Amino acid sequence: MIKQITPILFMAVLLLSCSRPTTTVTDNGWEMVPEIMKNISAPKFHDKTFNVVDFGAKNDSTFNSLPAIIAAINECNQQGGGKVLVPAGTYYLKGSIILKSHVNLHLTEGARLEFSTEPTDYLPMVLTKWEGTECFNYTPFIYSYQCVNVAITGKGEIDGNGAVTFNTWKPKEKPAMDRLRQMGNDSIPVYERVFGEGWHLRPCMIQFLGCKNVLIEGVKIYDSPFWIIHPVYCDNVIVRDVYIDSNNYNNDGCDPESSTNVLIENVKFNVGDDGIAIKSGRDQDGWRIGQATENVIIRNCYFARWAITIGSEMSGGVRNIFIEDCKIDSCRNGIYFKSNLDRGGFFENLHMRNIEADVCLWGVINFRTDYHGYRGGNYPTQFRNITIENVTCNRVDSVAIMANGVPEAKLYDITLRNIEVKKAPKATQMKNVVNLVLDNVKVNGRLVTKENE
């Protein structure tokens, strides 16, 4: 458990965070990518196979195969690691899979994991993070804590059955959400932030917490109860060739949080909330931990409904984000930066290029520094050094491009280059931006300049 900090130390950390100098990155920041990729590689596993059927799992949608899968994982771990093989068939699980170090959970084509719809199956509680604040809550459906070399691979399917029970929790969770956020703001010790049964905080689908060398590759994921893939405090994470189809409340596709050296590529998102949301903790809890998300590469991804978001829980800071060659079908915001005066922290060094969007209802590029949930703080987030280029969008139903800083924290060094929105009722809305460069930005066939923005 991370220690609480005194108010004086907290303010020192906050001031350092908000006043840190901009990291030196050239306009061609893409030169950093090969260096980042040197720190990203798939984990390696011993050539041993542990078939869950040999441990008692059954291709039976009414038989609980969880004990057999847990036994196979434990044996694999005790023997130094390898592949826990789930062969073709449907396997019903009354509870959570706990992954251990050096274990590759491999779902062959035709294999399907079906999770229970009974919330008590996901007890006892574990240390987790819920919308940026640490607490003890229901165990995520697949969970790994402080492990090295862990993976979920194969061409099989994972079905959370989240809509059956957990979707009904959304209207009931506000008291728990408010209580948790207040505990975070008041620096209540994490061991006292106990939720679980009766509190209606939905668990994540897949969460790796404090892990190193993580791989999720090839699988198909359906019907999550809450956030879907959530690496927290992790290093060296790969999410590759995954298909996600889950449209319940708050179904973010992949949320790297306070994690470093992350690669997300060739992923197809059809989700009920942000496709990818980059985060680093909420308010006081994020400052207490102070771990940024940095060195993230996103490429060749497809977004069917919601796209790419930075924030809003980003109090630990975000830096060195590289996004390229992505396609957006129809969404609210294409490229969305969100924060408010409670968040603090910083966001710096984003380079994005080659984005094709069809419809972005609220804007293809949107900086929003007054995002809802504001609790009356005065800790503005620092945004700086952002280059977005080679973006096309067929239609926006609101303002095509929005970049709205606040007087307390203006947006610095924003370059928009080769941006074209073919149809929008309004081209831009911009204020409190310092060193804004508009280079070949077109809306409705008209070149946008600083004079006519």
Image (cartoon, grey):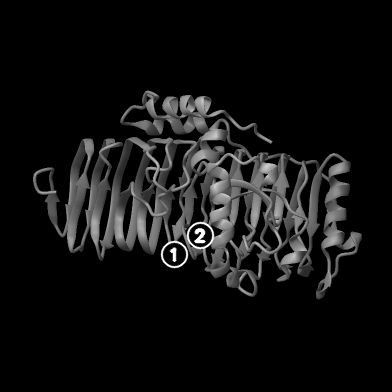
Residue at image point 38% right, 48% down: 338
Q: Quadrant of residue 184?
A: top right
Q: Nearer the viewer, residue 363 or 299?
A: 363
Q: Is residue 112 visible?
A: no
Q: Residue 229 in the image: x percent, y percent?
A: 59, 53
Q: Is residue 289 visible?
A: yes
* Residue receiving disc 1: 304
Q: Nearer the viewer, residue 250 or 48?
A: 250
Q: Quadrant of residue 145?
A: top right
**339 to the left or right of 149:** left
Q: Residues within 10 Å of mark 2 (few under 14, many from 20)?
A: many
Q: Residues within 10 Å of mark 1 (few under 14, many from 20)?
A: some
Compared with 333, 150 (above or below) is above
Q: Could you tell me how many numbered marks the image carries?
A: 2
Q: Judging from the image, what secondary structure is the residue with disc 2 in?
A: strand
Q: Label 2 near label 1: C-beta < 8 Å?
A: yes
Q: Amino acid at mark 1?
A: Ala
**83 to the left or right of 361:** right
**335 to the left or right of 53:** left
Residue at image point 22% right, 40% down: 432
Compared with 403, 148 (above or below) is above
Q: Amino acid at mark 2?
A: Lys
Residue at image point 52% right, 29% down: 7
* Residue receiving disc 2: 268
Q: Nearer the viewer, residue 273 or 81?
A: 273
Real-space Cα separation, disc 1 to disc 2, in angstroms: 8 Å
Q: Residue 112 in the image: x percent, y percent?
A: 72, 67
